[in-house]
Amino acid sequence: MKNLKAFWAKILIFLSVMGPGIITADVDNDAGGITTYSVAGAHFGYALMWSFIPIIIALVIIQEMCSRMAVVTGKGLADLIREEFGVRVTFYAMTVLVLSNIFNTISEFAGVAASAELFGISKFLLVPACALFVWWLIVKGTYKSVEKVFLVACLFYVCYIISGFLSKPDWNLIAKSTLHPNFQFDKAYIFMLIGVVGTTIAPWMQFYQQSSVVEKGIKLENYKYSRLDVIIGAFVVNIIAIFIIIVCANTLFANGIRIETAKDAALALKPLAGQYCFYLFAFGLLNASVFSACILPLSTAYSVCEGMGWEIGVNRTFKEAPQFYSLYTTIIVIGAAVILIPGVKLVPIMLISQATNGILLPFVLIFMLLLVNNKRLMGKYTNSKFYNFCAILIITAMIALSLFLFFTVFIK
Amino acid sequence: MPDQSTNINISAAKMFIFFSQLMDKPVLDKDGQGVGEIYDLVVKSSQVYPLSDALIIRKGFPNRKYAIVSWANIEKIDRKGTQLKIDKSSLNFNQSHHEKKEFTLRRDILDQQVVDTYNHKVIRVNDIQLLVVDHALMIAHVDIGSRGLLRRLGFENGIDLIIRLFNPQARYLKNAHLISWKHIQPLTINPVSMTIKIDLPQKNLANIPAADLGDIFLDLNIKHQIALFKSLNFFNKTKIFTNIDFKTQSSLLDEMNDSEISELFNNLPSDEATDFLEKLPQEKIKKTLNLIESKYSKRLSQLLGYSGDSAGGLMTTEYIALAKDTPVAAALNQIRERKFKSEPAQFIYIVDETHHLISTTNFRRLILANPEEPIQNSGFPKTYFVRLDSSIKEVAYLMEKYKYFAIPVVDKDNILQGIITVDDILSQLIAFAWRRLKRIKIMQKT
C-alpha cells in the first residue's frame, strides 16, 4: 500500500516535470525529418535501421547536458553563452541561429503546403490559416497552456506507428537489421546516413530544451525525472522515425518506387497500403509541420532575447516584450509567405538550412561542453570523466558530419 | 513608468570612458615594453560608486596567464593604452585569475543580469561607463541600450556614420541608454556565503512598491532568487515573500535554515502566513510551526484550523484592541507606542476584560472625542461583526453595505478573534469573479 502510494507520488512528479525533453525530441520529427526518413526507407529499405541506436545515445547525451545545465544554473544556453563568452560570440551565434531557423520554418510551412495538397485543400488557404493559428497560440497563450497543446501534438505522432502496423511489416527482418549494422560503402548510402543523423540533432534543440526546462522551474531534487523526460523523448522520436522507415521500406522499397519528398511518399502509399495508411501519413505530416512551425520561431525568439538581454514573452504582452514578439512574428510571416510565392524552389532552401545548421552545431556543442564542465557554474554537477569521454566522442563525430554536410552543399 | 535613463551627451563627456574601450587594450611596463592586455578591473565595493582597485592583465594564447596589478602601480590608463609604473619582471603571472571574494567588472557585471531599482526591472548590462577621477576610475553608469551592444560588437562607429549621413540630428546619436550605478543592484553571488556580493543600501529595494518587487523577483532565476533573498533585511524579505507565487515561496523555504525561517515567519502578518502554510503538506506545516515563536505559532495553527473561505480562514490577528475604560488620551498614546505588523490600522476595537467585543471606533472619532472620557463612549452606535464560520459572501455583503474597510470576527461567545480587511476579501472576490466570467464566456459560445 505504502509502496503504491510512493509510486503514484513519483508518477505525479514525473508528469509535472515532463515536457521539455519529449517536446524537443518530437519537434525533431518535423517536415524535413519525415522527408528524410521516408526517402531513407524508400531507397534503402531497412539498411539504415541500425543507425538509430547510436542516434538515440547521442541525443540523450547531448540533451541531458542541456537539461542538467538548466536545472543547476537556472539559466538558458544563450544566457550562459553571453555571460561566459561575451556579447560578440553570442551575437554571431544568434545571427546564424535566426538565419537557420528562418529557413527551417520555411521548410515546415512547405510541409503544411504539401499536406494541404494531399488533403485536396488549397495551400493558399491552409498555410495562412496555420500561420495565424501558430501565432495566436503563443501571443495569446501562457507557457502552461502552450505546453499542453504541444504535448497533445506529440500524441498525434502515433499516426505513424499505426500506419506502420497497417503496412504489415516483417518484424523479424526489422529486428535483425536494427541490431546488425549493415554499412555500405556507397556514396548515396553515406549521404543518406548523414542526412538521417543531421536531421535528428539540430542546434535549435539545445537552446529550446534548456530554456523550457528553465521556464518550468524544475528543482534539483527532481532532476532525475527531467533526465527521464529526455531519455523518453529520445526513444519516442526515434521509434517514430523507425516506423516511418518501416512504412516506406515495406511498401515503396519493396516495390522499387523512388521518391523525393514526404508528399511523394504519401501519394505512393495510397495504392500500396490503402486509404487509411495514406490519410494517417498525411495527417502526421501536417501535425508535425504545424507543431514545428510553432516551436522553431518560438525557440529562436527565446534564445535571441535571452542572449541579447531583451524581455522574454510567452507570459508577457506585446508591449512588454516587443523584440520577442516582433522576432517571433517576423519568422512566421517570412516562413509562410515564401511558400506562397508561385514557383518557389524548395531544394535550395533546404540546402541553406542544412548549411547554416552545419555551421552552428559545432560551436554550440563546444560551448556546451565548456559550460557543463565549468566548476564555477555547475559545482559538483559537471560531467564525469566517462561521460566527458562519450560526449567528446559524439561531439567530434557530429562536428565531422556537419562539416561534411556543410561542404557537400557547395560541392553538389 | 517613465524610463529614467540618464541622458548624457557622450561627445561632450571626455571624462567618461567605457569599459569596453579599455578591455583587451595593450598594457606596457615602465620601459614601454608590452606585458599583455587588460582583462578585468577589480573594484572596491565599499562606496555607492565603487572605485578601481586593481587591474587584471592577461597574456598568451591559448595558454592564458593572468597577473594582478594594484592601482598604485599604474602610471596612466586611457583608450589608447595603459602604462605601468613597474617593470615587467615584477609581475607575477598565474593560471587562475580571480580571487573569489573580490568584485570585478568583467566577471560580475558586464553581460550579467542586474536589477534596475529605479525602473523596477531586471536588465542585462551591455557596457559599463567609468568616470575618470584623478587617477582612478569610478563606476558611473551601466549601458543597457542598443548603442552599448553595437559598441561591444565594434559596429558603433560604422552605424554612427550611417545614421549621421541620413539624419545628423537623430536622437540615437545624442542619447545613450545609461542607468546610474546608484540604482543598480548587482546579482553576483559570493560562492562562500551564497549571498549577493555587493549590496547597496537596502532602501533602494525598500522603495520599490511591494507588487513590483515581487515581479522583479520572479524574473530572476532560482539561484539568484535565493541569494538575493538571503541578503535582504527582514523588512524586504517580508515584502517579497508576500508578493510571490506559492511555488517560489516553497522553494525559498526549502533553502532557508531554521533561524531564517523563524525570523521570516515571526515577521509575516498572520493572514499571509496562513495563506502560505495551508498549501503545504501536513508534516511541513508542523515543522515550520515548531520554528515559530510559541505564542504566534499557536495563533497560526488555530487560524489554519478554519476553512480557507470562511471568516476564520480569511482573518488576520493583527488588530488594535483596547480595554473599554481606557481614557481616549491614553488610548491614543498606546496606539502611538505600539508597533503593528503590516495591517492598516483603520479601526480600534473596544473590548472588556475577557476580550468580548463591545464596540468599534476609528481614529476620527477618537481624535474628536473628549480626551478624558473612556473610549467606550466614542464607539460607533452599533457594532457590526461576523462569526468565525461566516461565509465569504456574508462578509463581503456586510462590508459593502456599511462601507467598512475592515470588519471584526468573533467566536460564538462574542470574543474577538481577528479582523478581515477589504484587501483580503477583494482578492477572493476577484478570483471568484474570474471564474464566473469564464463560465459566462463559455456559455455565450455554446
Image: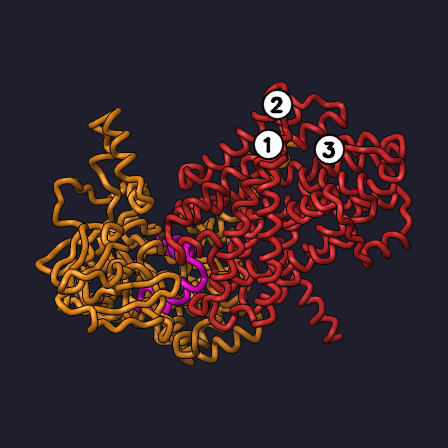
Under mark 2, the amino acid is Val
Q: Residues within 10 Å of mark 3 (few under 14, many from 20)?
A: some
Q: Which chain is orange?
A: B
Q: Position of residue B380 (x, y in %)?
A: 32, 56
Residue at (34, 64) in percent of width and height: B188
Q: Residues within 10 Å of mark 2 (few under 14, many from 20)?
A: few
Q: Which residue is mark 2?
A: A344
Mark 3 vs mark 1, CA separation in Å: 14 Å
Magenta residues, dominant SS class: helix
Q: Position of residue B427 (x, y in %)?
A: 45, 51
Mark 1 vs mark 2, CA separation in Å: 9 Å
Magenta residue check for A90 = no
Query: Does residue A4 appear to the left or right of A97 in the view shown?
Result: right
* Sequence-earlier tag: 3 or 1: 3
Q: Position of residue B433 (x, y in %)?
A: 52, 44
Whether residue B12 is situated above or below residue A226 in the rendered picture: above
Q: Are marks 2 and 3 in contact (CB under 8 Å)?
A: no
Residue at (40, 41) in percent of width and height: A320
Whether residue A329 is situated above or below residue A96 in the rendered picture: above
Q: Which residue is mark 3?
A: A261
What range of the chain is rendered magenta?
Answer: B210-236
SS for tag 1? helix
The part of the image, by quadrant, that contains residue A356 is top right
Under mark 1, the amino acid is Ile
* Sequence-earlier tag: 1 or 2: 2
Residue A15 seen in the figure: no
Q: Which mark is residue B103?
A: none
Across the whole image, how many numbered discs are drawn on residues?
Answer: 3
SS for tag 2? loop
The part of the image, by quadrant, that contains residue B157 is top left
Q: Which residue is mark 1?
A: A349
Same chain shared by disc 2 and disc 3? yes
